[in-house]
Amino acid sequence: MIHTKSLHFSYGKGTDFNFPDITASSGDSLLITGGSGRGKTTLLHLLGGLLRPQSGQVVVEGTDIATLSEKKLDTFRGKNIGLVLQQNYFVASLSVLENVVLASWLATGKQAETKAKELLEQLGLKGQEHKLPSQLSIGQQQRVSIARALINEPKLLLADEPTSSLDDENAYTVADMLSGLAKQFGTALVIVTHDQRLKDRFPNQISL
């Protein structure tokens, strides 16, 4: 589903990153670890098309996303890439359900409300659909973020530090959910993290 080749990115002033080549197929999970400043989030943003490399390739479902125009990249990302970011950016005035449905409407023009409800229930959020995100715990908000990332059944799911703000129990629960859902949906999962607790959960790992 995704592979990279010779990725290079620079912020200038001597901050240069040369990333190892990575590959993840349908249903696979890949854990990318490394200390602060090693470029974990930069790599995730390159994989998701939020940043463009100075050189190299990011190929998702046979498409080198670095070659797409901004408009085509936005469309491609909406249909093929799910993002679980370190900060859960929700529309504060919309309910949990409405936030998840919004992601389907923006990408496809359709409101997949039934699928959104099913995902939320699968993620243990039945009965929370009509609450505001601010009324949920941090762990529950992270699950809403996962539901929103999966609503369009992406080919690639990217998660940036998905467990860093969670206690042990919730961290393991979210990690297992991500892995299980990737297999269920046939999605390639890439997690970037410094959370050492996840190392035992994901045998396929790269350290930056």
Image (cartoon, helix red, strand yellow):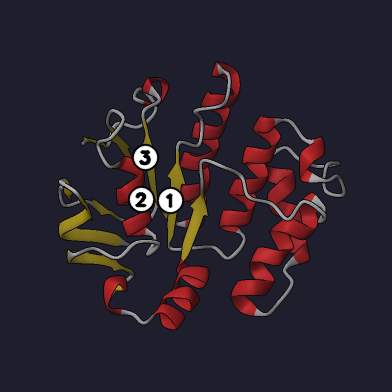
Query: Callout 1, which amino acid?
Result: Leu
Which mark is on residue 180?
Answer: none
Whether label 2 touches label 1, CB < 8 Å: yes
Q: Disc 2 and disc 3: Cα gap in Å? A: 7 Å
Of badges 2 and 1, the one in the foreground is 2
Q: Residue at x 37, y 21 (%)?
A: 196
Q: Helix, strand, or loop for circle 2?
A: helix
Whether label 1 touches label 3, CB < 8 Å: yes
Residue 70 lies in quadrant:
bottom left
Q: Residue at x 62, y 39 (%)?
A: 142
Q: Position of residue 56 (x, y in %)?
A: 16, 64
Q: Say whether residue 166 is visible.
A: yes
Q: Residues within 10 Å of mark 1 (few under 14, many from 20)?
A: many
The residue that disc 1 covers is 158
The residue that disc 3 covers is 192
Which residue is situated farthest in the top direction here? 168
